[in-house]
Image (cartoon, rainbow, N blue to C red):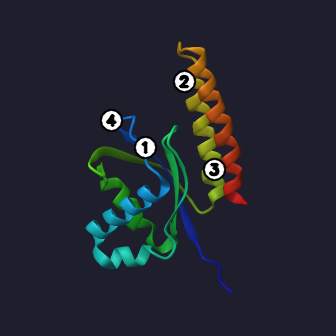
Amino acid sequence: MVRFKNRYFLCEYIQENQEWEFSERDLLNEIKDQVEYHFGQFGSGKIQFSFQVKYLNSISRLFILRVSREYKSIIWSTLLFMNMFRGVPIKIRTLSCSGTIRKCEIRARRLLTKWVHKILKCDMPNQLRNTIIRDYKQTKQILPQLTQ
C-alpha cells in the first residue's frame, strides 16, 4: 500500500485592514475559487482531493495548507498571484514548503516566538500585553495537536 504524499505550505497573509477576520472555510473557498480562475476546472479538480487548511491563526496571520505533492505548483502559483480576498486587498507570502507538517509547525513556532518578542519590546498597555501573551500560549498549545 502506498501512502499519500503531501506538501505543507506555511504562509502569512498581509492585509491593509487589520480588523477584518475570516475562517478556515473562507480561506479554503477563496483559494479554490482562485485556482479555478487561474487554472480552470482542470486545476480545481486536481487539487480537490487533498487540499485542506490545517491551521489558521488570525492574530499572527499564519496558516498551513496541505496539498498533494504532484499539484503543489498549482497552489504555489495561485498564492503568488492572489491579491484580493472577498474584495479586500491582501498579499500572501509563502514562508515554507515542507513534506511534513511537523517541519511547518517548528517553523511556525519559531516565527511566532520572534513575532511575540518583537511586539513585547514595544511600549504598550498591560492589558494588551497580557492578551498577546495569552494568545501566544494558546497558539503554542494548538500547534502540537496538528501532528497527532
- Residue type at tag 3: Glu
- Residue type at tag 2: Ile
Label 4 to label 3, Cα distance in Å?
Answer: 26 Å
The residue at the point 50 percent across, 67 percent down is 67
- Residue type at tag 4: Glu
Q: Earlier in the sequence, mark 2 or mark 1?
A: 1
Numbered disc in front, either 4 or 2 = 4
- Residue type at tag 1: Glu
The residue at the point 47 percent across, 52 percent down is 23
Report the residue marked by disc 2: 119
Which quadrant of the figure contains the C terminus? bottom right
Report the residue marked by disc 4: 16
Q: Are marks 3 and 2 in contact (CB under 8 Å)?
A: no
Label 2 to label 1, Cα distance in Å?
Answer: 20 Å
Which circle marks residue 105 in the picture? 3
Rendering coords of residue 88 (x, y %): 29, 45
Which circle marks residue 21 in the picture? 1
Q: Are marks 4 and 2 in contact (CB under 8 Å)?
A: no
Numbered disc in front, either 4 or 1 = 1
Given residues 26 and 10, the one toward you in this image is 26
How many numbered marks does the figure carry? 4
Label 1 to label 3, Cα distance in Å?
Answer: 22 Å
